[in-house]
Amino acid sequence: MINIKKKYSNENLDPSWDHQKVSYNTNKYNWHGLFLEATKKKYKHIKDLQLLHEYLDTSELIEFRKHLEKFTKSKQFSSLVDQFVSEILEGRYEHKEYMIQATPGLRIVVPNQIEKNRLLAFHTGHWTGYDNGTGTIWTPITPAFDTNTMQVTDWDTSQKLMEQIHQNKWKLDKIQQECEKVSWPVDVKVGESWLFNQGHLHGNVNNNTGLTRLSFDVRVAHKEISFGHRRPGSYYRFPKTVLSFNQKKIDTKRPWVAFVTPNDQYLGMAPYFMIREYLLQWCKELNIKPNEWSNEYHECEWMPKFTDFISKKNTGILFASIYNFSISVEERLAYFKEAIKNRNQLLFCDENILVKSEDDLEIIKNYYRFYY
């Protein structure tokens, strides 16, 4: 169970992230123009993002969001976000090393979203897998105001509500009702961002403005936090990097095997077939035709099947993640080096990493350094 008193200790509240509004140069960071341009590459008929609900049916919004997410993963967008975040952090962030959310969260708040079952209810970052020390930079792409903007509560109020919520096990409608009573709308124009901590309760109310609000949020995390499920390399990236690789470097003609171990926390209780289908979908997109699908033996934490595959030459091994191993980090890196000597290719799907040489191991080492 969450320790409310510990989570809301005053030492966890950084004043720089306690509901602070910051301005930025829209000529340098023309987010609205960039997102509209990206939209038009597929949806040429959309001319006004505030009227998105008039152009697209609600059932089309997930596909629309996936389209824009491809843009947010691009080198162009990531590079601009790196500069943007760096400027915001200057003078308010004491950590020289930090990671940035790899795929920014894109929020689409259409009018009367409650009727469409699209209300983002009140929540804290603690409920969605984030730790204190993780800062959120919330940036509207279109004007955010009144009922179409994010609603927030202050730190002390958030703590009091969280104590009641967990003690009394409130249902979602009760959480929403009580939060609406004490929250206020964030009035943020295009050219401004809102900074807040993970303990602040925040969410949306029904949008009665008649206009759609688009925004994106980026989280920044330093090495001392508990990453949990939001792992480096998967959810976070280092500045000046992108989570992608050159597909042309993959040798699709060599024999490939898709490999998973059930003996670590990464896989947990997820059914094998779900992970298998995830990896096989990757194979399909990369034009890899694996010869085999293999699971490590249960209760064999030393991973005998994995080490046997590594010992073979000129093969390819597809893994779910650099974290899906039951052996130590040192052992992993040693076996990765052995695989390289055997001219094998290692592909880690969750982190978008292809390992062919020891140079490719440097980014994995840095991810491990931040996570463990």
Image: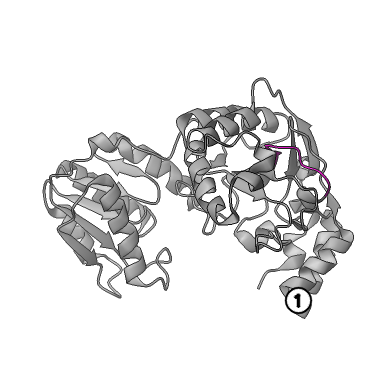
Relative image position of residue 312 (x, y in whole percent): 12, 53
Which residue matches tag 1?
A: 170
**How many numbered marks are there?**
1
Farthest-out residue, bottom: 168
Label 1 environment density (alpha carbons within 10 Å; few <14, some 14–19, many ≥20):
few
Q: Nearer the viewer, residue 257 or 48?
A: 48
Q: Which residues are magenta?
A: 138-146
Q: Nearer the viewer, residue 227 or 255?
A: 255
Q: Quadrant of residue 274?
A: bottom left
Q: Is residue 206 magenta?
A: no
Q: Is residue 185 left or right of residue 368?
A: right
Relative image position of residue 255 (x, y in whole percent): 13, 51
Relative image position of residue 203 (x, y in whole percent): 74, 56
Q: Quadrant of residue 293?
A: bottom left
Q: Residue at x 50, y 50 (%)?
A: 63
- The figure's colour scheme reads one colour
Farthest-out residue, top: 27
Q: Residue at x 56, y 51 (%)?
A: 61
Q: Is residue 140 left or right of residue 40?
A: right
SS at circle 1: loop
Q: Is residue 222 left or right of residue 351?
A: right
Q: Would residue 216 be visible to someone looking at this image?
A: no
Q: Is residue 110 left or right of residue 304?
A: right
Q: Quadrant of residue 118?
A: bottom right
Q: Nearer the viewer, residue 277 or 226?
A: 277
Quadrant where the N terminus is found in the figure? bottom right
